[in-house]
Amino acid sequence: MRLIRKAPALVLTALLLLTGAVACAGGGDASLPAAQEDMAGLGQLKGQARRPVQGQERREEQDRDEQGREEDEGGERQAPAPPKLKQTPEQRLAAAQRWGLDQAPLVAPPPPREKPRLTTPEWADQGPDLIPAPARVPTEQKIAFLTIDDGAAKDREFLDMVRDLQVPLSAFLTDESAAEDYGYFRDLHALGVSIQNHTLHHPQMNHISEDEQYTEICGQQDILEREIGVRPTLFRPPFGDFDAGTLAVAEECGARAAPLWNEEAFADRMDFRHDDQRFHPGDIILTHFNGPKAWGGTMCDMLRTVLRKVTEQGYALARLEDYA
């Protein structure tokens, strides 16, 4: 009898549950748009939570792209110089003395955020709308720029001296001189030295055809990009001889300037273009990868000569690519 009395209760409970389920089903159908609206709202809120992140990512990508364009247009397609180890004045002096210098080289101030506008001196001007061929960088700071041409002498001791004294410089290579050992110049590049273009075979550019100039400049661009890993942005015409066509071809091949020079350095002396026989702010110095056979001294002798002269006159060496 107890079971019989429980049966109606169980049936009633089942009926109530069934009725609730139907009501829930009906209510669910009736409220589906609202539920969808709620879910859509939730999705929108989630989307809004994600979109700033996506926007941030896009902005970061744009920043990277803009930085890349800035590097391509005005700055560094060359690899940036590696960070230098901080040295105390005592350490700098000790390093200088190890290399036969009485004074430690002066340290250049940080380069400007925006590179200065380069100009071609009157004696080298070839007309308007050409890339500049500067002999100096417009600046009031007492800095000069050491540039080394060709690539014949590959003095390993010179690498050690550049590393120990943290000397900023730029190398302009001809393939005929450098091809024997591009590994040497990769080692130099790893020290922060920028590798630039000086043609394949060192011809007098204004004495050859436009097609030959294209081969000489663009051909060396391709080789240096393959051998060093970066494409040069500067081109130096051999002997400093060029015409308007040379500069047009150099720009077509990717150069943004064709640096000349105001001083030339040798193992035992320096020659100045200026009548006062002194450096002027922003001067570009020319020298070559030579050795005893060419000038009676080593690459280290040349660097000692340059460092003594610039330091005596209160100048520091800076890296040309940071300004040009």
Image (cartoon, grey):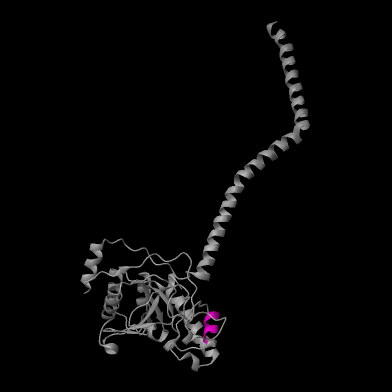
Identify which residue is drawn at 58% across, 55% down: 58
Q: Is residue 228 left or right of residue 27?
A: left
Q: Residue 100: image x %, image y %?
A: 21, 74
* In front of the other: 30 or 280: 280
Residue lying farthest to the front in this orientation: 276
Q: Residue 121: image x %, image y %?
A: 47, 83
Per the picture, the main secondary structure of the magenta-coloured stretch is: helix
Pick the quarter of the image with the N terminus.
top right
Residue lying farthest to the top in this orientation: 1
Q: Is residue 106 visible?
A: yes
Q: Residue 301: image x %, image y %?
A: 26, 80
* In front of the other: 177 or 149: 149
Q: Is residue 150 visible?
A: no
Which image quadrant is residue 8 in? top right
The residue range painted magenta reads: 246-252
Q: How many marks?
A: 0
Which image quadrant is residue 23 in? top right
Please say if 53 is above or below 98.
above
Identify which residue is drawn at 53% across, 60% down: 64
* In front of the other: 57 or 283: 283
Please say if 75 is above or below 207.
above
Q: Residue 164: image x %, image y %?
A: 28, 69
Q: Is residue 248 magenta?
A: yes
Q: Is residue 123 magenta?
A: no
